[in-house]
Amino acid sequence: QVQLVQSAAEVKKPGASVKVSCTTSGYTFTNDAIAWVRQAPGQGLEWLGWISAGNGNSVSAQRLRGRLTMTTDTSRSTAYMELRNLRSDDTAVYYCARWVVSAKYFDFWGQGTLVTVSS
Amino acid sequence: QSVLTQPPSVSGAPGQRVTISCTGGSSNIGTGYDVHWYQQLPGSAPKLLIYGNTNRPSGVPDRFSGSKSGASASLAITGLLAEDEADYYCQSYDSRLNAWVFGGGTKVTVL
């Protein structure tokens, strides 16, 4: 069965960077893409971007360009999301999800990683 | 403020039918982009409920159904169960924002 397992919660200071991992299993990693979505406390879902695990092409939300980097390690079937220059409003649960590129939806999700930005 | 508008909450008694609307515009649903729906149980990650406007993934009960008309879409839950208490989100693409977008979410309460 398809599984996405994310790294543990992080606490960071403003201005720092965070890198969240998403290790997949149960399917051929390079056949699909991984997307990142976040949810601030008590708020809705926000799409951040997606990266093709096959060729590394990526698309990210305009408001995060310059701060967000998505990468993959095909040898580990793992995707990574790095967010730099953290601000307090980046505090959220960050989810990875398998992105069905052809039909534009997220079919399997990781359990989420809480990133807290606090001085 | 999302470009896809959902009611903040809906409620119903066990066994009843509830519907959740997702209203967009000419740069998203109205242009023909598909709508997908997710269920988020308390403290859990979202789960795909409906894809491509009307399709249910394997394992999703047929009590859940989706529809789309014009610039709006709807999710219907029939035979409401206590386990259906959750937040529900619609999702589509917006060509003006050049981004994939979610509705603000609807909390379903089973009375």
Image (spheres, rainbow, N blue to C red):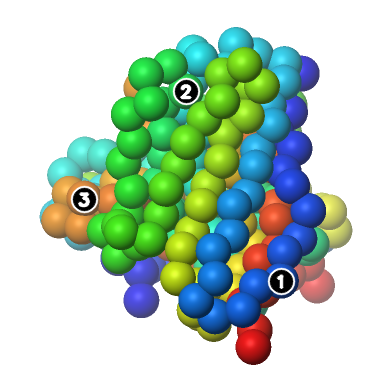
Sort mark 1 into few (<14), some (14-19) or many (20+) by Cα contacts within 10 Å: some
Tags 1 and 2 in contact by the CB under 8 Å rule? Answer: no
B48 and A56: which is toward the camera: A56
Residue plotted at (51% across, 15% down): A30
Given the image, on which type of amino acid does mark 2 rest?
A: Ala
Seen from this angle, which residue lies furthest bottom?
A119
- Between discs 1 and 2, the one toward the N terminus: 1
Residue plotted at (45% across, 42% down): A70
Is residue A73 something one can see in this rendering?
Answer: yes
Decide if residue A50 is on the left or right side of residue A86: left
Q: Is residue A67 above or below residue A20?
A: below
Seen from this angle, which residue lies furthest right?
B82
Decide if residue A63 is on the left or right side of residue B65: left
- As helix, strand or loop, the secondary structure at mark 3 comes to loop
Residue A12 lies, in percent from the top left, at 65, 73
Q: Is residue B22 above or below residue A104?
A: below
- The chain to which mark 1 is attached is A
Residue beneath disc 1: A11
A16 and A62: which is toward the camera: A16
Sort mark 2 into few (<14), some (14-19) or many (20+) by Cα contacts within 10 Å: many
- As helix, strand or loop, the secondary structure at mark 2 comes to loop
Report how far apart the C-alphas of labels 1 and 3 lie in the structure.
31 Å
Report how far apart the C-alphas of labels 1 and 2 lie in the structure.
28 Å
Image quadrant occupied by the N terminus of chain B? bottom left
Residue beneath disc 3: B98
Is label 1 or label 2 in front?
1
Residue plotted at (53% across, 47% down): A81
- The chain to which mark 3 is attached is B
* Badges 1 and 2, same chain: yes
**Label drawn at residue A53:** 2
